[in-house]
Amino acid sequence: MKCISFKPEFIPLIKNGTKTVTRRIKFKGLMGERYYFKAGRTGTKEGYLQIEHVMTERLHEMEYTEIEFIKEGIPEPAKFKALWNKLNKPGFKWEDNPLVYRIVFKYLGEEL
């Protein structure tokens, strides 16, 4: 089973259903696939997700609706943009408006 990592502060938001979307520069998954997820690159397994929908878009498209920031787990756009810039390399910064994968997922629980 494939793994997807999240910042530790997002784990409770995934588990309580607040965070249901993530955006990534690279993603090879398909709708319907199940993943286990963990906190950071070295964290332990926290639970399971199922990919509900995958599409590509320009990063700035999420600004057209404030709900996208909420689904990402960071309701304040400025905080999301700052975190995005911290996590991504030049060429993929917020200001660059890169093409990203918008991944909608559903939390399945800690055990399958």
Image (tube, helix red, strand yellow):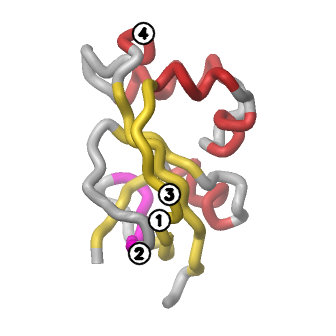
Q: Which residue is mark 1?
A: 51
Gap in angstroms between the C-alphas marked 2 and 3: 12 Å
Q: Which residue is mark 4?
A: 95
Q: Nearer the viewer, mark 3 or mark 1?
A: 3
Under mark 3, the amino acid is His
Residue lying at 38% horizontally and 56% vertically, measured from the top left: 5
Which quadrant holds residue 63? top right
Q: Which residue is mark 3?
A: 53
| Span shown in magenta | 33-40
Dot 1 alpha-carbon crowd within 10 angstroms: few under 14, some 14 to 19, many 20 or more: some
Under mark 4, the amino acid is Glu
Tag 4 secondary structure = helix
Gap in angstroms between the C-alphas marked 3 and 1: 6 Å
* For residue 50, above or below residue 75: below
Of the image marks 2 and 3, the number of the one nearer the N terminus: 2
Circle number at residue 93: none
Asked whether the residues under the numbered discs 2 and 3 touch, taking CB atoms below 8 Å apart as contact, a structural biologist would say no
Q: Outermost residue toward the bottom?
A: 112
> Residue 81: where, in percent of width, then height?
53, 21
> Residue 35: where, in percent of width, then height?
39, 71
Q: Is residue 36 magenta?
A: yes
Of the image marks 4 and 2, the number of the one nearer the N terminus: 2
Of the image marks 4 and 3, the number of the one nearer the N terminus: 3
Residue lying at 35% horizontally and 63% vertically, measured from the top left: 30
Does residue 15 appear left or right of residue 102 in this picture?
right
Q: How many marks?
A: 4
* For residue 14, above or below residue 47: above
Which quadrant holds residue 71? top right
Q: Which residue is mark 2?
A: 34
Tag 1 secondary structure = strand
